Structures are given as structure tokens and as C-alpha cells.
Image: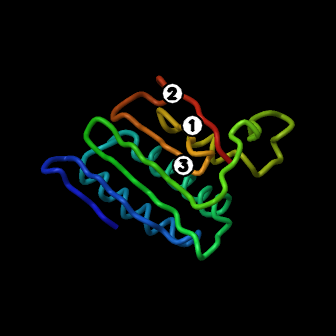
């Protein structure tokens, strides 16, 4: 894990994880400790934690299919006013428009789409890029939940 403290309460983090579900919790725990030290997302750190866990699970399970030869790459920028996170897998991507709404009555029994739904509900902005292999999420500090959110899509 590479962490750069920019001489103040700002952190730039880059890390590559193996495509193992077991790698998620130890990594997220470390990231959240750094975010807490930085003073970012005081009121919304749980939202950031859940969204990061969901993005990593999607990348490992759906993107990389838990292939041990593939990795998941994470970039996190944290400053007092905002946290931005990018998660990139080494999979083939997906068509954002084919992901069904998990809250629709016909999809209530489906196990797909809930992670995306949570990410979009918890973060201020969620975007999918590069054919779906990259998810970018942003959360402003001390913003009321649900305000000014831009919606994206993913698994």
C-alpha cells in the first residue's frame, strides 16, 4: 500500500489487492483507519466504508471472477472536504444499462444489483468508466445523506 500525506490532512492512497474476498476486510479496515486519522467523512464514514466494501466485492467477484492471476486496483484521495475512491478490476467490464433495479418488484428475489444500489444510495456520486471496469465514487464531508447525488450503475 502506498500512502502519501501531502503535508496536511490529505491522503493519497494506491493499492493493489488480490482477487480474494478474504482480502476485502483487512484492506478496508486499514483504509478506514487512515480516513479517520485524516478527519475526512466524520459523519459519513460508515457510508464510505460500506460503499468501498461493495465496490471491492463487485470487482473481485463479478469483475475478476476471483481469478488469482488478476488484481483489483484502488486509488483513494482524502481531504477534509471530500473523499474520492476509484476501484478498477482486470475483467472485461459490463454494460451499465443491463443492470436491473433491485428495488423493482420483479427483482426482489434477485441477488444482483444490490451492491450498486447501496453505493449509489450512500455516496454523493458514483460513475462507471472504461466499459465498467472502473467505478469512481465521491463523498463530500458533512453532507446530509441523500443530497445532490448523481447516479451511476454497476453489478
Q: Earlier in the sequence, mark 3 or mark 1?
A: 1
Numbered disc in front, either 3 or 2: 3
The outermost residue toward the right is 106
Residue at 40% from the left image edge and 40% from the top image edge: 44
For numbered disc 2, what is the local secondary structure?
loop
The outermost residue toward the bottom is 68
For numbered disc 3, what is the local secondary structure?
strand
Pointer 2 with pointer 1, Cβ within 8 A: yes
Q: Is residue 138 left or right of residue 135?
A: left
Numbered disc in front, either 3 or 1: 3
Q: Which mark is residue 134?
A: 3
Residue 51 higher or lower than 145, as above or below: below
Q: Estimate how packed mark 3 is, as few (under 14), some (14 to 19) or many (20 or more) residues with alpha carbons within 10 Å.
A: many
The outermost residue toward the left is 7
Give residue 47's position: percent from left, percent from top: 47, 44
Pointer 3 with pointer 1, Cβ within 8 A: no
Quadrant location of the N terminus in the rendered image? bottom left
Quarter of the rendering containing residue 81: top left
Q: Which mark is residue 120?
A: 1
Q: Is residue 7 left or right of residue 149?
A: left
Q: Estimate how packed mark 2 is, as few (under 14), some (14 to 19) or many (20 or more) residues with alpha carbons within 10 Å.
A: some
Q: How many marks?
A: 3
Q: Which mark is residue 24?
A: none
Report the residue marked by disc 2: 149
Residue at 47% from the left image edge and 60% from the top image edge: 73
Q: Earlier in the sequence, mark 2 or mark 1?
A: 1
Q: Earlier in the sequence, mark 3 or mark 2?
A: 3
The outermost residue toward the top is 148
Distance CA(mark 3)–CA(mark 1): 15 Å
Amino acid at each position: 500500500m502506498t500512502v502519501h500525506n501531502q503535508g496536511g490532512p490529505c491522503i493519497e492512497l494506491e493499492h493493489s489487492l488480490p482477487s480474494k474476498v478474504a482480502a476485502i476486510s483487512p484492506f478496508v479496515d486499514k483504509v478506514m483507519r487512515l480516513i479517520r486519522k485524516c478527519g475526512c467523512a466524520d459523519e459519513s464514514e460508515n457510508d464510505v466504508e460500506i460503499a468501498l466494501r461493495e465496490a471491492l466485492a463487485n470487482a473481485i467477484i463479478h469483475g475478476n471472477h476471483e481469478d488469482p492471476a488478476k488484481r483489483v486496483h484502488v486509488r483513494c484521495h482524502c481531504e477534509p472536504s471530500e473523499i474520492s475512491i476509484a476501484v478498477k478490476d482486470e475483467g472485461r467490464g459490463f454494460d451499465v444499462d443491463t443492470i436491473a433495479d433491485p428495488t423493482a418488484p420483479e427483482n426482489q428475489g434477485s441477488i444482483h444489483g444490490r451492491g450498486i444500489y447501496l453505493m449509489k444510495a450512500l455516496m454523493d456520486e458514483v460513475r462507471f468508466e472504461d466499459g465498467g471496469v472502473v467505478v469512481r465514487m465521491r463523498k463530500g464531508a458533512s453532507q446530509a445523506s441523500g443530497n445532490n447525488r448523481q447516479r451511476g450503475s454497476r453489478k
